[in-house]
Image (spheres, rainbow, N blue to C red):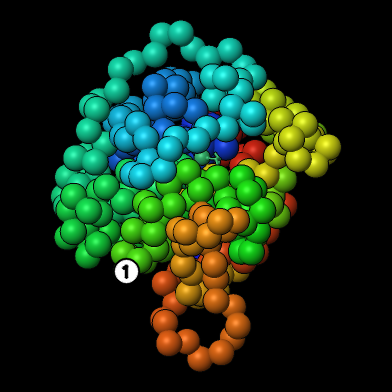
């Protein structure tokens, strides 16, 4: 299957891996716009960081500001991985532009209605904006080409033993999305952890040459050190978010299986868990998710290196 160039709105919470997702989306998709959500760091910083990546990459993609907090849950952030700025590591550009609007939901609704059946929502942060768009415009469920998320994990989490960060920050929003009936591709931790970016991969990226490759390698150096400190001791961070883009632009990199997945909202120890029914018995519930189960990590790394090199 050849790579396609889908029309994409990237909803994100930059975040180091979101930053790489922006680079991959701009390189391989028709990036209609970037919408920001509170997640890894508060909304003013995720928005500032999205604007910074637009400047670093030399993009003309508009940035629209979204929700400053989850639908119901109290805000939760991840400075322990991404640093106080949300993009610690390299120096960020000072001369940032301004957001195109402070109405991400309106942008999403208008853009999807303008191109029925063509636009994908790629979400690499908490699903607050996506849920609000689906609730604000119920016709979106029929008009979207689909939703591709980085989120969840089968069967493990990272923010808790059961829950992955993006889902745990806003489980109610995730529940709206998983029950929406929209075509849903899920890049959970079970596949993203197959793509750790360690010193060797970062050296490959640097060797690609160019300002952008160097900037991204600096981001990934910080990110890898954070993962070593918090999780494994190994200086390699899983490159979660770009996978939600690559699932659309390079589907040949993945193995996928249909699954019925629900979001736990009330469990004392399991709130935010994405529970997949993998029993293999006849379902009384039809699959609602295309669950990514495997990535060709070596090929994905080569693609990332060549993509970053094209920015110069
Ligand atoms: O659990 C990983 C996810 O949470 C990634 O999207 C990362 O950027 C954070 O948002
Ligand atoms: Ca993210």
- Is residue 110 toward the left or the right of residue 229 in the image? left
Residue drawn at x 43%, y 38% as measured from the top left = 74
Q: Quadrant of residue 4?
A: bottom left
Q: Would you place residue 30 above or below residue 188 in this image?
A: above
Whether residue 119 can be seen here: yes
Q: Quadrant of residue 196?
A: top right
Closest to the observer: 23 or 169? 169
As drawn, the residue found furthest toward the bottom would be 282
Disc 1 Cβ-to-ligand 1 distance below 8 Å: no
Q: Position of residue 165 (x, y in %)?
A: 55, 45
Disc 1 packing (10 Å; few <14; some 14–19; many ≥20) = some
Q: Would you place residue 181 above or below residue 278 in this image?
A: above
Whether residue 10 can be seen here: no
Q: Position of residue 140 (x, y in %)?
A: 21, 57
Closest to the observer: 221 or 176? 176
Q: Position of residue 129 (x, y in %)?
A: 32, 43
Residue drawn at x 45%, y 58% as measured from the top left = 265
- Is residue 191 toward the left or the right of residue 85 in the image? right
Residue drawn at x 52%, y 32% as measured from the top left = 77
- Is residue 295 toward the left or the right of residue 262 in the image? right
Please count the marks in the image. Answer: 1
Which secondary structure, mark 1? loop
Would you name the residue on which mark 1 appears?
181
């Amino acid at each position: 299957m050849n790579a396609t160039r889908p029309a994409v709105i990237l909803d994100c919470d930059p975040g180091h891996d979101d930053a790489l997702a922006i680079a991959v989306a701009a390189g391989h998709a028709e990036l209609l716009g970037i919408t920001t959500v509170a997640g890894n760091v508060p909304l003013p910083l995720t928005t500032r960081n999205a604007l910074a990546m637009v400047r670093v990459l030399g993009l003309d993609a508009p940035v629209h500001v979204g929700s400053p907090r989850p639908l119901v849950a109290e805000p939760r952030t991840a400075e322990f991985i991404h640093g106080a700025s949300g993009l610690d590591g390299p120096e960020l550009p000072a001369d940032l532009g301004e957001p195109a609007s402070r109405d991400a939901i309106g942008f999403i609704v208008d853009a999807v209605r303008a191109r029925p059946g063509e636009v994908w929502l790629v979400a690499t942060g908490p699903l607050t904006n996506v849920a609000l768009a689906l609730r604000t415009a119920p016709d979106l469920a029929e008009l979207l080409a689909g939703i591709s998320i980085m989120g969840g994990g089968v069967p493990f989490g990272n923010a808790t033993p059961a829950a992955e960060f993006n889902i745990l920050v806003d489980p109610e929003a995730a529940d709206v999305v998983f029950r929406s009936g929209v075509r849903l591709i899920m890049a959970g931790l079970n596949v993203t952890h197959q793509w750790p970016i360690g010193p060797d991969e970062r050296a490959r990226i640097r060797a690609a040459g160019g300002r952008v490759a160097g900037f991204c390698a600096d981001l990934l150096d910080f990110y890898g050190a954070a993962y070593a400190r918090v999780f494994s001791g190994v200086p390699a961070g899983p490159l979660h978010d770009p996978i939600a883009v690559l699932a659309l632009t390079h589907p040949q990199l993945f193995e996928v299986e249909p699954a019925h997945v629900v979001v736990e909202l009330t469990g004392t120890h399991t709130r935010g868990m994405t529970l997949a029914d993998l029993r293999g018995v006849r379902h009384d519930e039809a699959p609602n998710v295309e669950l990514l189960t495997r990535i060709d990590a070596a090929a994905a790394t080569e693609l990332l290196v060549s993509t970053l090199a094209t920015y110069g």
